[in-house]
């Protein structure tokens, strides 16, 4: 059972799901204008805070996950499900939605 390492958050993703804490982008000023949250790009990097046990293949054998808790990853811009847990924003994605480990 995987749990978040740096918070009191306790979550156990199912199968090949991963819980990611998106990295916050720095505030930007363009030409002296404030960019509202609704106009900002969605982050595509985050830190893995929980990992499921892996998916089962057709023979019932569990395939281990390639990412682990603490990894910094890149993921697709509009992928996964956004959730709020214990006051924090998280993203739950399938392992196949992770593009790279940094």
Image: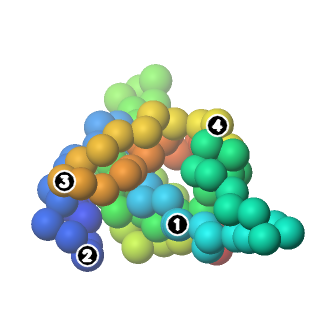
Residue receiving disc 2: 6
Q: Is residue 38 left or right of residue 69?
A: right
Residue 12, percent from left and from top: 22, 47
Q: Residues within 10 Å of mark 3 (few under 14, many from 20)?
A: few
Q: In the rendered view, would you say 49 is above or below 15?
A: below
Name the N-terminal-most of marks 3 and 2.
2
Name the N-terminal-most of marks 2 and 4.
2
The dot on residue 78 is: 4
Residue receiving disc 1: 23
Residue 63, percent from left and from top: 44, 45
Query: For the point 25% across and 73% down, which residue is it?
Result: 5
Q: Is residue 44 visible?
A: no
Residue receiving disc 3: 86
Q: CA distance from mark 3 to mark 2?
A: 13 Å
Q: Is residue 71 left or right of residue 27?
A: left
Name the N-terminal-most of marks 4 and 1.
1
Q: In the rendered view, would you say 89 is above or below 48?
A: above
In this view, the residue in front, 22 or 63, is 22
Q: Residue furthest right?
A: 31
Of labels 3 and 2, the one closer to you: 3
Q: CA distance from mark 4 to mark 1?
A: 15 Å
Query: For the point 30% across and 44% down, which residue is it?
Result: 84
Q: CA distance from mark 2 to mark 1?
A: 14 Å
């Amino acid at each position: 059972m995987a749990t978040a390492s740096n918070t009191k958050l306790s979550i156990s993703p199912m199968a090949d799901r991963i819980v990611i804490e998106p990295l916050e982008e720095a505030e930007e000023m363009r030409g002296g204008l404030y960019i509202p949250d609704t106009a900002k790009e969605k982050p595509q990097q985050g830190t893995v805070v929980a990992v499921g046990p892996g998916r089962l293949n057709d023979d019932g054998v569990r395939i281990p996950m390639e990412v682990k808790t603490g990894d910094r990853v890149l993921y697709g811009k509009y992928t996964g499900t956004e959730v709020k847990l214990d006051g924090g924003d998280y993203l739950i994605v399938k392992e196949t939605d992770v593009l790279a480990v940094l």
